[in-house]
Amino acid sequence: MSNNQRSAFFVSDRTGITAEMLGHSLLTQFDDLMLKETTLPFIDSLEKAQEAVQRINQAARADGVRPIIISTLANTEIAAAVGKANALFLECFQIFISPLENELGKRASHEIGRTHNVNDIVNYYRRIESVNYTLSHDDGATTRDLSEADVILVGVSRCGKTPTCLYLSMQFGIRAANYPLIPEDFEDRQLPKTLRPLHDKLYGLTIAPMRLQSIRNERRPNSSYSQLDNCEREVREAEALMKRENIPFLDATRKSVEELATTIMQQAKLERRIY
């Protein structure tokens, strides 16, 4: 394989967003370099670190040249374990550009703002397309072209589907639709007819009833929609439906949009399209 082609891994004990954004910013300084970039989030144990090392070493063997690791691992023991991989291992507090120049045999351009260069027209249009798709398929507004979604989030009203979809589309270039589960679905004890052929694209969100009540009460104060007993019933029925249908789901109560989106990307095995 040409020295212009190699793998890069962004490794973090949290979402990996800092590592991947910093890493991508650094690597775009090198012209004509073809990279396969992979984010490994939530590496927060030695077991996960060893699994990451195996994956990185596999890439090294496949590429014929050692990969690059850019890390934001806070735990020194876990960082040391990942550092044993057959790769150039860089931590956030080290000096980046000089080691990269030595490893890649290239002089960095040292230009500011290359991460979002206006000439990156492919990324630009991918972002616009994914955001437009997500906005037009928000809250079950339309079922047209729903089969073209990369992922369809389901859950009760106001559980966090819309912001998570928007983050997926804006940050990752994912065509993310969302569809609400409503009382009629719970009475039928099955998914809406529109979603049944798309089961493999479904991913659920749930939320603590008290948190849901608080959110709904801001939207429709003192309504039956926002009453705690109604919120408890809807959440209970939605979770039961998702379990019956074998739909993976996350509890959004205490997770940030960034954490939700990154976990969905990882667990649903979605491929990032933009940086």
Image (cartoon, rainbow, N blue to C red):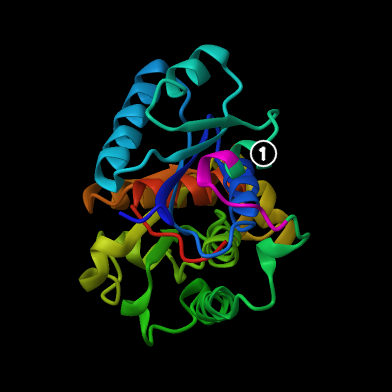
State the image quarter where residue 220 is shown.
bottom right
Task: Look at the picture and state if 165 lies above or below 212.
Answer: below
Q: List the single residue furthest toward the top.
A: 77
Q: Is residue 36 visible?
A: yes
Please indicate whether residue 145 sits to the left or right of residue 198 in the image. Answer: right
Closer to the camera, 177 or 9? 9
Please indicate whether residue 38 sits to the left or right of residue 12 in the image. Answer: left
Task: Look at the picture and state if 16 lies above or below 43.
Answer: below
Q: Quadrant of the N terminus?
A: bottom left
Magenta stretch, overall SS: loop
x then y, percent, for residue 146 = 36, 79
State the image quarter where residue 192 is shown.
bottom left
Residue matched to label 1: 98
| Residue at image coords 26%, 70% | 198
The magenta segment is 102-109
Q: Quadrant of the C terminus?
A: bottom right
Q: Is residue 255 visible?
A: no
Task: Look at the picture and state if 22 lies above or below 48.
Answer: below
Q: Secondary structure at mark 1?
A: helix
Q: Say which amino acid is labelled 1.
A: Ser
> Is residue 24 found inside the magenta-colored segment of the image?
no
| Residue at image coords 41%, 40% | 67
| Residue at image coords 60%, 66% | 170
Please indicate whether residue 214 sits to the left or right of residue 185 in the image. Answer: right
